[in-house]
């Protein structure tokens, strides 16, 4: 064993070199004052396609962002090669504050939430009236996620040539949700697309629905230059459609400045992340009645002040029923 005397600064003492040859880490991050703002259009295996001014730029997330992930709809700060030329790659160095977030979990027991879309103003919940049959529990869950995330819901009912929308309209009429009814024939001649387009003016709208309901067909009718593969196939055994959209994609509506975001078809919509206290904000006529509620009231218990509020004629009883149905959807499976 080598021994050293009390003079430990001798020249023959070797120090371990920095094998990577890089500078020591620092907590001071660059400000990237030369960055340019862009919008994330789609994400594919770590590569993000962004719109920067009028150019399409491929980018990757900078290491300094850590676990923060950019999603479709995010406004981001980008540096590097912003020419948009082939084989170029820029870096996303900052994700700007989001105005809204549509989130879901795999199921109600999964604590890991997934951000589907950021900065959307409206959530278009697309459901077929037949083939496949409507799934009200899934619609309820999408509505809860919209209210929780700060998005305005829109109900889009397709395939009205196969079934009447009356039953669904009766179920959701008291929620005061705007709606539009379409048929396959009208989509082909453009009439349905024009009616839907009226609800999209001045907004960024995310489209969500389970597989086979005609969501991508509708998006293709709205943005014909960006046609995505259409399903039209429904499993004969399960009565459910097959996925065709595998990643969310933001598409501009020609000549309007508005955006639609097509999302993959969902077969479940977990609500583990939802704060029930935010859902009631979508019922402004009921909010004043909660002042007498006990602390942490679920609004579906014996001492809830909303019962007396409605009994005194301050609000429609059907509205309270609708609120409680949405709040209870987290406690039920989508097939109930």
Image (cartoon, helix red, strand yellow):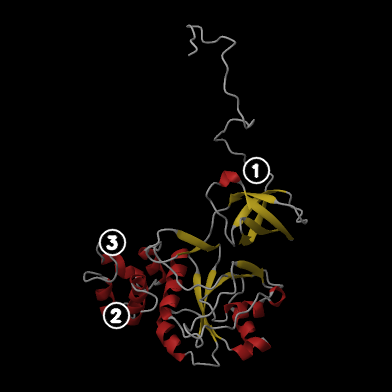
Answer whether labels 3 and 2 touch (C-beta < 8 Å): no
| Whole-number angstrom distance, CA of label 3 to CA of label 2 | 24 Å
Residue identified by numbered label 1? 32
Residue 107 position, x and y percent, is: 41, 66
Query: Mark 2 — residue?
Result: 313
Specify few, some or many for label 2: CA neighbours under 10 Å numbering under 14, 14-19, or 20 or more: few
| Circle 1: element type | loop
Q: Residues within 10 Å of mark 1 (few under 14, many from 20)?
A: few
Image-based side of 67 in relation to 293, left or right = right
For image coordinates 59% across by 62% down, the residue present is 72
Q: Specify which label sits upstream in the sequence, 3 or 1.
A: 1
Relative horizontal placement of residue 212, taking residue 224 as reference (left or right): left
Q: Which residue position is annotated with label 3?
A: 296
Q: Residue at x 61, y 58 (%)?
A: 45
Q: Is residue 53 visible?
A: no
Report how far apart the C-alphas of labels 1 and 2 lie in the structure. 58 Å
- Labels 3, 2: front one: 3
Say if 172 sits above or below 166 in the image: above
Quadrant of residue 139 within the rendered picture:
bottom left
Q: Compare marks 3 and 2 and give the one earlier in the sequence.
A: 3
């Amino acid at each position: 064993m080598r021994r050293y005397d009390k003079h430990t600064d001798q020249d023959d003492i070797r120090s371990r070199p920095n094998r990577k040859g890089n500078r020591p880490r620092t907590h001071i991050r660059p400000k990237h004052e030369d960055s340019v703002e862009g919008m994330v259009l789609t994400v594919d295996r770590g590569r993000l396609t962004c719109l920067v001014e009028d150019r399409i730029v491929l980018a990757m997330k900078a290491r300094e962002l850590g676990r923060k992930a950019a999603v479709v709809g995010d406004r981001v700060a980008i540096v590097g090669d912003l020419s948009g030329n082939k084989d170029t790659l820029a870096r996303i160095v900052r994700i700007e504050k989001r105005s809204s977030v549509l989130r879901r979990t795999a199921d109600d027991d999964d604590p890991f939430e997934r951000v589907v879309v950021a900065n959307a103003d409206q959530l278009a919940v697309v459901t077929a009236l037949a083939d496949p049959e409507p799934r009200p529990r899934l619609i309820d869950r999408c509505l809860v996620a919209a209210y929780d995330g700060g998005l305005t819901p829109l109900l889009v009912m397709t395939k009205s040539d196969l079934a009447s929308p009356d039953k669904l309209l009766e179920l959701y009429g008291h929620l005061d949700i705007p709606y539009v009814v379409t048929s396959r024939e009208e989509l082909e001649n453009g009439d349905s697309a024009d009616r839907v387009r009226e609800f999209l003016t001045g907004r960024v709208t995310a489209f969500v629905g389970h597989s086979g309901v005609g969501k991508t067909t509708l998006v293709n009718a709205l943005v014909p230059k960006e046609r995505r593969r259409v399903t039209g196939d429904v499993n004969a055994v399960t009565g459910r459609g097959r996925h065709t959209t595998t990643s969310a994609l933001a598409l501009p509506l020609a000549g309007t400045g508005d955006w639609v975001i097509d999302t993959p078809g969902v077969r479940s919509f977990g609500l583990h992340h939802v704060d029930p206290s935010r859902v009631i904000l979508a019922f402004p006529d009921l909010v004043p009645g909660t002042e007498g509620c006990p602390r942490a009231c679920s609004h579906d218990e014996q001492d809830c002040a909303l019962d007396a509020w409605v009994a005194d004629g301050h609000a429609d009883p059907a509205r309270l029923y609708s609120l409680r149905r949405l709040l209870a959807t987290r406690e039920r499976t989508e097939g109930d």
